[in-house]
Image (cartoon, helix red, strand yellow):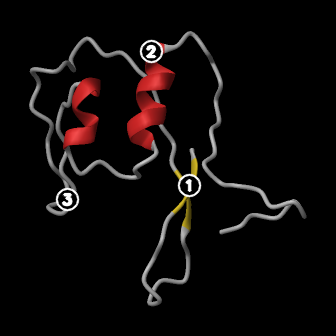
């Protein structure tokens, strides 16, 4: 997913790409504890219906992720970037 965000002046970028993959694994399921490799990033199993109740970023994924997983579409790319009349990005 292509996304932009409001960033403090200290940051030089406010544009990002998020890569999301769907996979299956015999050794991994919702009852498996996820090993945390970084203290500042929380990894947990969350039902799709509760994404709006947690601090899940980027915000647009709260809508796009369930739509993608629950649809039969194989659309590989989504963007929340808006285009101006001149064809350049507003953000």
Residue at screen point 48% across, 24% down? 67
N-terminal of the pair, mark 1 or mark 2, is 1
| Residue 2 on image: x %, y % | 60, 50
Which sits in the foreground, 59 or 21? 59
Residue under numbered circle 1? 3
Q: Residues within 10 Å of mark 3 (few under 14, many from 20)?
A: few
- In percent of width and height, residue 55 lies at 23, 51
Tag 3 and tag 2, C-beta contact below 8 Å: no
Left or right of 44? Residue 64 is: right
Between residues 23 and 5, which one lies in front from this camera angle?
5
Q: Which labelled disc corresponds to residue 70?
A: 2
Taking the spot 65% from the left edge, 25% from the top edge, the residue there is: 75
Quadrant position of residue 54: top left
- Circle 2 packing at 10 Å, graded few (<14), some (14-19), many (20+), is few
Q: Position of residue 64 (x, y in %)?
A: 48, 34
Question: Residue, x 29% and y 48% (percent of image)?
Answer: 56
Residue 11, compared with residue 87, is above or below; it is: below
For label 1, the SS is strand
* Residue identified by numbered label 3: 38
3 or 2: tag closer to the N-terminus:
3
């Amino acid at each position: 997913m292509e996304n932009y965000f409001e960033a403090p002046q200290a940051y030089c970028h406010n544009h990002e790409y998020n890569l999301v993959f769907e996979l299956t694994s015999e050794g991994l399921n919702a009852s498996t504890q996820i090993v945390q490799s970084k203290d500042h990033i929380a990894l947990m199993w969350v039902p799709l219906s509760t994404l709006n109740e947690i601090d899940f970023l980027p915000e647009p994924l709260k809508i796009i992720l369930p739509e993608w997983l629950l649809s039969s579409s194989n659309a590989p790319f989504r963007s929340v970037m808006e285009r101006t009349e001149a064809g350049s990005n507003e953000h």
